[in-house]
Structures are given as structure tokens and as C-alpha cells.
Amino acid sequence: MDSATLLGVRLQEICKSFGSNRVLDGVSLDIEPGEFLVLLGRSGCGKTTLLNVMAGLEAPTSGRLFIGESDVTVLEPSHQDRISRIGLKAATPRRKLAR
């Protein structure tokens, strides 16, 4: 994909709750076209939830998500092509196995 077709991603005050557990609390960030983003944090801090919201696999409880200039916060599943535009890669540390 050439740089003329790349789109930025903008999150505005994204919140996500599961019941009374607030996992994301007002996350805002701008990812420029062609830029890479790395999320680091302890287990359970919301990294995967944020990526799932960005990919359209989870709906945010509140806030807005834009790809380019399009507000894609709430789209019907049949209109969600953003998962093919956002590359997700989960990395876990290697663990030694006890013998």
C-alpha cells in the first residue's frame, strides 16, 4: 500500500467497561498514517481491549474512533472492513518450562 492510501487512526476519550470493571478510561491518541504503535503494560491493563476496540471487535462504552476522517465508532458488522486495515500482533514473553 503506498503512502497516498494510508489512513491515520484517532481515538477520542475511549472508555470500555465490562460490568462495573472499567478497563479503558478516557484513552485518546493519534496514530499518523504509516506509523507503528506498540502497547506495553502488565497483564490485564487493557492492551488487548484497546486493540479490539480499534479493530471493531469490541464496541467502546463511550468515546469516538476515527479512521481517516470517518467516524467508525459504531458500525454494523457488515460495514466493518477496518479489521483488514489494522494489523494486530500480540507478543508474549518466552517462558522457561520447568523440567
Image (cartoon, grey):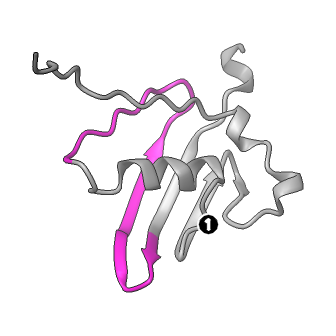
Q: Residue furthest bottom?
A: 20
User: Is 21 left or right of 67, judged from the image as shown?
Assistant: left
Image quarter (top left, top right, bottom left or bottom right) of the N terminus = top right
Q: Residue furthest front?
A: 99
Looking at the image, residue 52 lies above or below residue 96: below
Q: Residue 52 location, x and y as percent? A: 54, 51
Looking at the image, residue 94 lies above or below residue 40: above
Q: Residue furthest left?
A: 99
Q: Residues within 10 Å of mark 1 (few under 14, many from 20)?
A: some
Looking at the image, residue 48 lies above or below residue 28: above
Q: Is residue 62 magenta?
A: no
Q: Residue at x 62, y 46 (%)?
A: 55
User: Amino acid under label 1?
Assistant: Ala
Q: Residue at x 35, y 27 (%)?
A: 91
Q: Residue at x 82, y 57 (%)?
A: 77
Q: Secondary structure at mark 1?
A: loop
- In the image, the segment drawn in magenta is 15-42
